[in-house]
Image: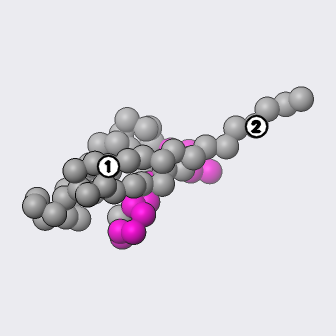
Amino acid sequence: MELIFLVEEDAEGGWNAKGLGEAIFTQAETLDALRVAIRDAVSCHFDVDKSPKIIRLHIVRDEVLTA
């Protein structure tokens, strides 16, 4: 089983992650801290035998370039 998280930069700083198809949401100040928070949230949400084998992060960020 694979679980996909939509990861977006927060407008006020940091990062938000939402599990697609599951009621899992977490946030952190850095991407490294977010990875830890996601693993923790997944382990709290699922029983050990039902836990996904793969956690995929779909990171979405806006970048602005000046012309």
The overriding secondary structure of the stretch rendered in magenta is loop
- Residue nearer the viewer, 6 or 53: 53
Q: Secondary structure at mark 1?
A: strand
Q: Secondary structure at mark 2?
A: loop
Which is in the foreground here, disc 1 or disc 2?
Answer: 1
The residue type indicated by label 1 comes to: Ile
15 falls in the magenta region = yes
Could you tell me which quadrant the N terminus lies in? bottom left
Residue lying at 45% horizontally and 42% vertically, measured from the top left: 29
16 falls in the magenta region = yes
Task: Give residue 22's position: percent from left, percent from top.
Answer: 35, 68
In this picture, which residue range is highlighted in magenta?
9-23
Which disc, if any, is residue 55? 1
Q: CB of mark 1 within 8 Å of CB of mark 2?
A: no
Residue lying at 42% horizontally and 54% vertically, measured from the top left: 5
Which disc, if any, is residue 64? 2
58 vs 62, left or right, is left
Which disc, if any, is residue 15? none
Residue lying at 31% horizontally and 55% vertically, measured from the top left: 2
The residue type indicated by label 2 comes to: Val
- Residue nearer the viewer, 53 or 65: 53
18 vs 46, left or right, is right
60 vs 36, left or right, is right
